[in-house]
Amino acid sequence: MDTATDRAIEMFDLPHLGQDPAHTYRLGIMGGTFDPIHNGHLVAAEQAYDDLGLDLVVFMPAGNPAFKQDKRVTSGEDRYAMTLLATSDNPHFTASRFEIDRDGVTYTADTLRLLHGLYPDNVAFFFITGADAIADIVTWRDAGDIARLAHLVAATRPGYDLSYARRVIEGSAYDFDVTYLEVPALAISSTDLRERAELGQSLRYLTPDSVIGYIRKHGLYDVGDAFQAPMQRDRAKMELTSDERD
Ligand code: NAP
């Protein structure tokens, strides 16, 4: 690898991989909005790591997600920070800024092309995401490139009806290579966590405590005032006092 490539890899918190030309490395790319990350994502990635014999799983929070232009999404910095906290104690995982630091709408095909440019040919990519998202993949920009550049891993909760996703993938003009992974912990969803946070309900055991702490400290998802850190409540009170003074 040349030094410019090394620098790019380090800048985006990506792992160095591919040093031994006689070995094929298997790199998982865990793609998701992670708004917020939860234990379902962590269990799914660990299961993919084990079942598919991956060398590492890189959690890559989506930058400016293509299909969420009309939706309210928490800032990339906050989603990245929560992802970093959630993955920091697992040596199989790492978190990368690769997508959140890119300007404009982030397309998976661009991400995979850029990754291929950074790594030698003996690194194979496994793009892991939710089965709902995989079922839509044929409509994504440059879907043929995605099929060429990565193996796909579709994570589902038990009981999820895969027939639609399978039909779409099999009927597609592209040669997708998909592994379906059933993950009981995917009964947890980010939508549910956001709703629970808003209602002031407990997030305990649904996402790591460090993520819960981050959500409360930064007042994400309109968490009830009771959950705000004392510092933040004090700041709000001080702002009120100074407004009243004006
Ligand atoms: P989404 O539509 O918000 O999620 C669809 C379903 O998949 C939800 O149930 C979601 O649950 C689940 N899910 C999402 N990521 C997951 C993961 N890594 N592991 C397990 N379940 C997951 O999907 P999204 O988060 O926006 O996008 C997923 C990935 O596809 C991202 O990397 C995104 O950039 C990519 N994408 C690319 C394009 C494109 O290139 N045109 C278009 C759409 C998506 P939770 O809400 O609980 O996560």
Image: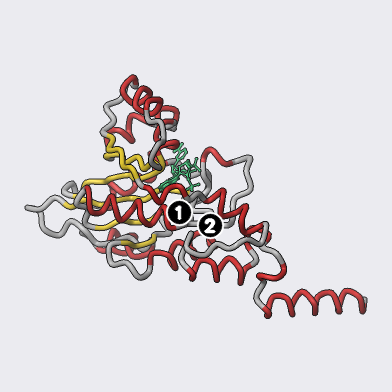
Q: Quadrant of the C terminus?
A: bottom right
- Work out whether mark 2 precedes mark 1 in sequence or the reverse, and give the earlier one: 1
The image quarter in which residue 58 lies: bottom left
Q: Position of residue 107 (x, y in %)?
A: 44, 41
**Badge number at residue 76:** 2
Q: Position of residue 67 (x, y in %)?
A: 53, 38
Q: Position of residue 133 (x, y in %)?
A: 44, 37
Q: Quadrant of the N terminus?
A: bottom left
* Left or right of residue 178, residue 246 in this image: right
Q: Residue at x 29, y 52 (%)?
A: 47
* Left or right of residue 195, residue 151 in this image: left
Q: Is residue 235 above or below residue 2?
A: below
Q: Is residue 73 above or below residue 77?
A: above
Q: Amino acid at mark 2?
A: Gly
Residue annotated with mark 1: 61
Do the CB atoms of the residues marked 2 and 1 lie less than 8 Å apart? yes
Q: Residue at x 48, y 70 (%)?
A: 210
Q: Residue at x 43, y 65 (%)?
A: 86
As helix, strand or loop, the secondary structure at mark 2 comes to helix
Q: Residue furthest front?
A: 159
Q: Residue furthest left?
A: 22
